[in-house]
Image (cartoon, rainbow, N blue to C red):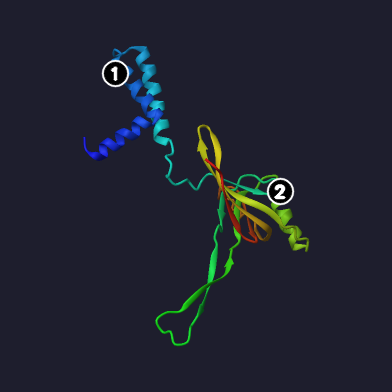
Amino acid sequence: MNRSQRIKSMKRKADPYAQMAAQVATQVAAQRKGDPYAQVAAQVATEVAKRTATQKRKGDPYGAYRFRVEIRGIQVAGFSEIRGLEAETEVEEYREGGVNGYVHRFPGVTRYPPLVMKRGITGDYSLWEWYAGVNEGNISRKQGAVILLTRSQRALKEVCRWSFNGAYPVKWIGPEFSSSSNEVAVETLEIIHNGLKLVKKPD
């Protein structure tokens, strides 16, 4: 057994699900062919193997398909897409007299692009009403967060969140209709805010 195989073997031994799967597999092998207990054990071993294969290891990247959006004061359904989680700091250059080998660079203003959110239209019109209020001069700034989720056992668990504040909508886009399409009617809301803050959840 080479070094790589020994490491993999040690990882499997440290995994409780892998240990359980190995024990069940041993029992299955010991049963006679056609034994109903062996069939049940084989089904259990298959299920345990699936759980072992899908179990997330520490250090693996999280999927970008499990997330939630919270906006204070607005009850919103799940969004299908979020864009604009960005931050960019401008750089100011200063040329020092007599120094020709390089240019001094200093951090300037940090800018945050708008957040663009998409969701299917339901009977909830709170996003449109929020935008309509701004369009009428009634600007309601709100706090909110984009939350990254992961599956833990059978429930969704929060990994971290990017909080924002002072947000209000500046653009709303309605769905595109076509009698030949069977796509879901989607609305898009674009909001500006005063910055992002990452909040990590303890393990």
Residue ID at (70%, 49%):
72
| Horizontal arrangement in the rendering, residue 170 relative to residue 40 (left or right) | right
Secondary structure of residue under mark 1? helix
Secondary structure of residue under mark 2? loop
Q: Which residue is mark 2?
A: 74
Q: Which residue is mark 1?
A: 29
Residue 144, position in %: x, y?
65, 52
In the rendered image, the residue lying farthest to the front is 98
Q: Is residue 170 above or below residue 70?
A: below
Work out whether residue 11 or residue 137 is closer to the camera in this orientation and state it: 11
Q: Is residue 181 above or below residue 168?
A: above
In the picture, the quarter occupied by the N terminus is top left
| Horizontal arrangement in the rendering, residue 139 relative to residue 182 (left or right) | right
The kind of residue on which mark 1 rests is: Ala
Residue ID at (50%, 78%):
93
Q: Give the distance between the C-alpha atoms of the residues marked 1 and 2, in whole angstroms.
A: 57 Å
Work out whether residue 61 or residue 115 is closer to the camera in this orientation and state it: 61
